[in-house]
Amino acid sequence: MNQLKKLLFGIVIIACSIQVVHSQNSNFISPLKSNASSLAGYQLVWQDDFKGTTLDETNNWVIEVNGDGGGNNELQYYRRENISVGNEPVSGKSCLIITAKLESFSGKVCTSGRLKTIGKMQFKHGRIDASIKLPHTANGLWPAFWMMGGDYPLVGWPKCGEIDILEMGNTNGINAGTQDKYYSSHYHWGESWNGGSYPNWGQAATSTYGVQDDFHLYTLIWNDTYLETYLDLDKYPNATPLAHMLINGTDVAGNAAHYFHKQFYVIFNLAIGGNFTGITGNSNIGKITALASGSANMYVDYVKVYQQGVTGEEYSGPVLAPNGINELSAQNQFKIYPNPTKNLINIEADSEISKVTLISMSGQEVMSVSNTKSISTSGLSSGNYLIKIVDVNGKAETHQITKQ
């Protein structure tokens, strides 16, 4: 749920159908029921079950801090203070907690939280599950579980690709009085915003039961042929996917196949207001009925990534130890050290390095060097950066470093 794309969401299904015609309508089908509920043949490669009292920012997460409105006229300021780990009061489960608050901060009239795994954990193809207890969106909350291409800082949006596994709070649900049942899943891509005519596809549905009363499972199945998103596969193993899209077309710019065969990172956030909800502008904060009591929480019990070990799958991140705990381990082709660094970054690799690019977390290229395995960082300001490494064979990896 990022960037200007949501400006079109008010016409949801009609708009998506029209844009299918302009892109690749052979990529969109109504699938038969599948056996997607089975984990047979999958292996768990990464998880965060949010045990303890602190978020794992070393291995897994980057917390966003900004008040830019996400390109969607959202009302919140994203703060670190709105991200926590603790117990969901009814079940007692240890969870990630994202809290939306009715409070003034830095020119905004409310605050909330957003976090992502960029530079920490990214993967290509597999299955991802998240067990989430959503807040009562009522009028104005916009919770989401989604993914973006790991090359976002390099190529921008929508060229990076986007997979919205779950979104709730849309104005269509508000208008129909089905806020607790109306949910959607969409895929977005393209070479540019193109005045809102970038290609995208997805579906919205009204569930037969409320999904804001307890924990529910949200799933993406992703391979070299298709993307599929599901609700509650653990409870309803014969469910059809909410959204299904083929991505096995010709690998050329503009076709979906060009954007969804690379590593993506995970995002959770709880937006307030915005075009998606039909409530914009600080003066309309009174319409955010979901915050009538002052705050609301989104709980994530766990998020898990599975892969089958087949050709084409990729994973970059902490290694999952036999005890099920993610441990930071050098398991990629390139090893970066020391990290954090003060003045120098070294790259350990079996092949010669062709190019190294350092990128700020806002997406600005700050340095580019060629044919070296040692990079001086003395001129960089303190903070986090992405480092993209390409060797002479064309192998590329992106890691995150910290400059002290």
Image: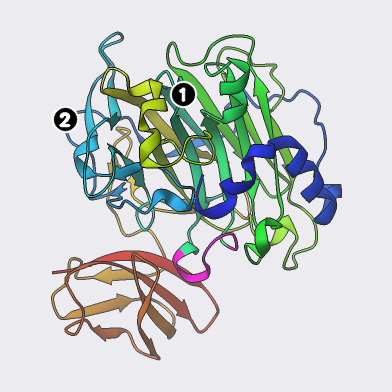
Q: Can residue 285 be seen in this view?
A: yes
Furthest residue toward bottom:
371
Furthest residue toward front:
283
- In this view, 72 is above or below 54: below
**Disc on the earlier residue, 2 or 1:** 2
Q: Quarter-wise, where is residue 308 in the image? A: top right
- Residue 300 belongs to magenta span: no
Q: Which of marks 2 and 1 is in front?
A: 1
Left or right of 182: which side holds 361? left
Q: Residue 282 carries which label?
A: none
Viewer-side residue, 163 vs 38: 163
Q: Which amino acid does label 2 sit on?
A: Thr
For the rendered model, the colour scheme is rainbow
Q: Residue 139 carries which label?
A: 1
Density class for disc 1 (Cα within 10 Å; few <14, some 14-19, many ≥20) is many
User: What span is in magenta?
Assistant: 153-159
- In this view, 236 is above or below 65: above
- Residue 158 belongs to magenta span: yes
Residue underneath mark 2: 53
